[in-house]
Image (cartoon, rainbow, N blue to C red):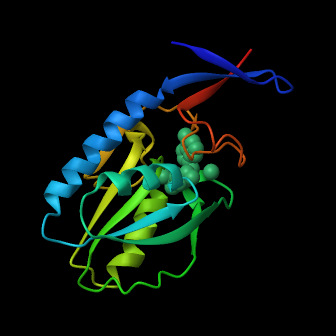
Amino acid sequence: MSSLDIDKDNLQTVEILLDQKTIARKVEEMGQLLTYDYRGESPVLVGVLKGCIVFLSDLMRAIKLPLELEFISAASYRHGTEQDEEVVLGGPVSIPLKERHVLLVEGVVDSGRTVSRIQGHIRLMEPASLEVVTLIDKPASHRTEIDIKYKGFTVGNEFVIGYGLDNTQQYRNLPFVGKLVDR
Ligand code: IMP
Ligand code: MG
């Protein structure tokens, strides 16, 4: 496994978990699968800001179908314990989702609360179907029952950065997925 010095002041090193080629191959594969599964349809991709952006921009170009694009934002606030975490949604979805095939696109699913909260919100709009697409899933961290039909990679409990994913708003522009390690 290779590593990269990126943040000399904080004395942290980024260890590469998923390199660019590995990600590109997987995203292409996911795009082909979605193209097949949604053949004859025009799905609406709803990206969860901000972590989805790099994944979504690559994925949408790998889907050979007419599609529409929408975004929703979500922020988690902790009141006391982790169980009390509240997910607040923002950015009104302007495309009517009633009777549409909706794909909710996330960068990473951790506790599953964000996805679960957004699914509830979208279901109220009575879509024809609703499935979750995530680049990375952390199944050991799930705190709620969620069904993720399309996932690129599974990782353990580690905090990952890059390819759109941040640590305190930094590192989203790394072209690979890595994790921070102390030196
Ligand atoms: P949830 O716990 O599944 O609701 O995830 C909440 C949000 O936390 C995700 O949408 C991400 O923005 C962020 N998050 C969770 N795990 C990671 C990680 O490993 N790296 C970067 N962001 C993460
Ligand atoms: Mg974040």
Residue in the image at 13% along x and 64% along y? 39
Q: Quadrant of residue 88?
A: bottom right
Along the horizontal axis of the image, is 15 left or right of 31? right
Does residue 81 appear left or right of residue 93 in this picture? right
Number of dots carrying numbers: 0
Eyeballing the image, is 134 above or below 79? Answer: above
- Measured from the top left, where is residue 13 in percent x and y? 70, 21
Q: Quadrant of residue 4?
A: top right
Residue 145 visible somewhere in the drawing: no
Q: List x then y, in percent, for residue 28.
A: 30, 42
Closer to the camera in the image, 106 or 157: 106
- The residue under the point 39% across, 36% down is 24
Residue 12's spot in the image, x, y percent?
A: 75, 23
Confirm whether residue 118 shows in the render: yes
Q: Is residue 162 above or below residue 38?
A: above
- Tell me where residue 60 appears, x and y as whole percent: 37, 57
Residue found 20% across the figure and 56% down from its top: 35
Q: Is residue 117 left or right of residue 61?
A: right
In the rendered view of the protein, which quadrant contains the C terminus?
top right
Residue lying furthest right: 9
Against 31, is 72 above or below? below
